[in-house]
Amino acid sequence: MLNIPAVQGTNVRHGMLIRLTVNGTVYRLANTWSPITFNGENYQALGHFLGVNQMQDDLKITNNSIQLSISGIPKDASEPDTPNYMGLILDERIKGSKVQIYRIFFNPTTNELLSGQTSLRFSGYISNFNLSDSVDIDSRSGTNNIVVECSSIHAILEKKISGRRTNSTDQKGLYPSDTGMDRVVAISQTAFDFGKPYTAPSPATPTDIAI
């Protein structure tokens, strides 16, 4: 459990760091006024990070989820280090990518990052995303927003389907020579009187054949 020391003073200044890992590549965003270095990693200031919805805190483990908003405006040529997040969402398999959100605090006088007062507020994985755009013809301007839905590992496990299908294809996928499930389709259309007393069939009577 992470204990956050009490912040001294009559006012506080805080910020948020987003660490997004997509197919082994790490993207870092912040809502601060200047770049932030945390754990030896540089986080881009302002830029594409638009906001995150309210986080829910519970005493017990729950399947929380949040929505992260990112600007979808393509990067400018003058900012070669800024990723094209719209292209990232459309071109990469982002579902299942890891998302970590940190809350950081600053000294209200010097605006310096307070060491030891950074906490991990959310850790989960991307489960869905939504793209939205609008165009203002009068002003000849447009907006592009990306909303990424992030779910905790508990929410993902709740949706997991356990087990396997009882058909010939699944069976042969595990045991290629096994024929135990080959007649499942035929049997599934057969009515069985479960619990009915068993009656042995009558023995076959030989037929006389005239020569």
Image: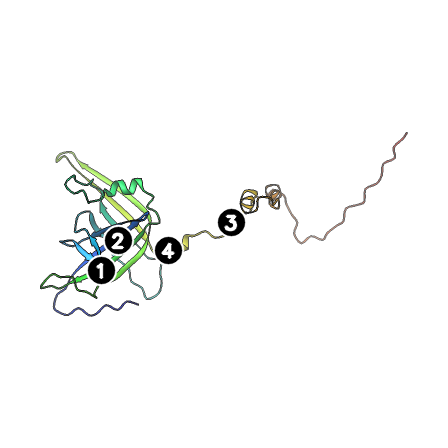
Q: Which residue lies under the disc numbered 1?
A: 103
Q: Looking at this view, is 120 or 113 the one in front? A: 113
Q: Amino acid at mark 3?
A: Arg
Observer-side mark, 2 or 3, equals: 2
The x, y position of residue 37, in whole percent, is 19, 57
Q: Amino acid at mark 1?
A: Arg
- Residue pictured at 41% horizontal, 52% vertical: 159
Observer-side mark, 4 or 3, equals: 3
- Is residue 199 shown above or below 139? below
Q: Amino acid at mark 4?
A: Ala
Is disc 2 in contact with disc 4, using a CB cutoff of under 8 Å?
no
- Residue pictured at 24% horizontal, 43% vertical: 85
Q: Looking at this view, is 106 or 64 the one in front? A: 106
Number of marks present in the image shown: 4
Classify mark 3: helix, strand or loop: loop
- Is residue 108 shown above or below 180? below
Q: Which residue lies under the disc numbered 4?
A: 155
Classify mark 2: helix, strand or loop: strand
Q: Is residue 14 left or right of residue 127?
A: left
The x, y position of residue 124, in whole percent, is 32, 55
Is disc 3 in contact with disc 1, using a CB cutoff of under 8 Å?
no
Q: Amino acid at mark 2?
A: Arg
- Residue pictured at 56% horizontal, 44% vertical: 172
Q: Which residue lies under the disc numbered 3?
A: 164
Tell me which label, 3 or 1, sits earlier in the chain: 1
Specify few, some or many for label 2: CA neighbours under 10 Å numbering under 14, 14-19, or 20 or more. Answer: some
Q: Which residue lies under the disc numbered 2?
A: 19
